[in-house]
Image (tube, rainbow, N blue to C red):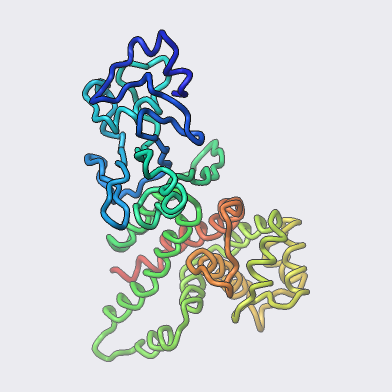
Amino acid sequence: MLPEEILDPDILGILPTVDGTDPSQAIENSGYLQIGDWIAIPVEQVASRIDIQTDPELQDETGASMGTLCLTGKLSGVQPEALTKWQYVAYLADVTPDYAGHPTMFRKNYAIVHLQFFQVYMNKYHISAPIWGGFSHYSPAPPVTRQHQTIVARPDIFVPTKFHSMSFGRCISSSNSFDRFLKLYHSLELIFDFVIMKSIQNLKDDMVGFSVINRAIHNRSEIERLRYIIFEYCDDCEGIAKTFTGISNFAIRSHEVFQDYTKDGNPLASPQKWADILASCRAGQTTEADFQKIKLCNQKDLPYSRLISNISAYWIYRVRSSIAHSRISEFLFEDSDEDFIVDFAEVLLTEVVRQVFSSKKLLSLTK
């Protein structure tokens, strides 16, 4: 509540004094609620590793107590009189006037800081709390969501190991598309090693086929491994190519990610090839005949299946690297780039993952 709401006679009359914390002392201090010597600073995020059953004391580097981190998830339904003084200050900051004096469902956690340390806390500790404390006073960017009228179940998807199952679970529990993209990419990283392991296990005593396996793993870079998996275990190249059309809605951003920060292995490094595929994607023309018409592929030197594998591997890997690596040699995504991930990059990666993990060729390795 705001100080003026707390001091309303009808509300103040039903609010108890708890452990010396008197609601009638409510004032505003720099936009925050102050009750006596305690100031409630909202906490927007808390790391999952921090157990909410205990309210940790906040100390400065000398060991002096600055206040308490009130983790309010355990307090829903608790009578105000049963709260500690720090929890009660958090309660007064959080409760709505309709529930004043009664148990409430807390909306936020709070750092309850003593007035003596308030300015020091704001100047020295507030912005860096995620590093030293595992919590943040800043709201996360809202997740980008899309409406789905139908969700089509896909049969025959094969989850080969418990590690893949965990990777898919972490993907779904991710709070944003950047993290979700990485978790989904990890499932493809592991599948290369799984394929090699199963291929070796299936060799007979004459070792026929070992040379093929050796060529697949010898001096392969990460992007080459990804390209190999897509080429060998994705059967519907046109299905993957259809997802390319999403890039046309992000012409500027995609040029920055894939062309301005181009790396070795870019199959569309030339400006003309980039312009051609962008125009083709805008027109929704991504079939084999479409790409042959603009001379991006041909039956002899660069078959359609190889082209699609090369492009999709390069695009997926570049997005992955931009998310995973924070360095000036990579494009650095901002929170505002989530649309690019959700509407293009994640759609492409998801289609590749679906095809790889429903591949009959992959399944045959386990028999």
Q: Nearer the viewer, residue 20 or 12?
A: 20
Q: Is residue 219 above or below residue 68?
A: below
Q: In x, y percent, where is residue 194?
A: 33, 72
Q: Nearer the viewer, residue 74 or 298?
A: 74
Q: In x, y percent, where is residue 50?
A: 28, 48
Q: Nearer the viewer, residue 336 or 259?
A: 336
Q: In x, y percent, where is residue 108?
A: 39, 35
Q: Residue at x 62, y 73 (%)?
A: 307
**In the drawing, does residue 178 fall left or right of residue 95?**
right
User: Which quadrant, please, contains the C terminus?
Assistant: bottom left
Q: Residue at x 77, y 68 (%)?
A: 275
Q: Residue at x 29, y 16 (%)?
A: 16
Q: Quadrant of the rendered structure where residue 124 is?
A: bottom left
Q: In x, y percent, where is residue 11?
A: 39, 12
How many numbered discs? 0
Q: Residue at x 28, y 78 (%)?
A: 202
Q: Quadrant of the rendered structure where residue 197 is?
A: bottom left
Q: Is residue 49 above or below residue 349?
A: above
**In the drawing, does residue 365 fall left or right of residue 257?**
left
Q: Is residue 165 above or below residue 26?
A: below
User: Which quadrant, please, contains the N terminus?
Assistant: top left
Q: Quadrant of the rendered structure where residue 132 is?
A: bottom left
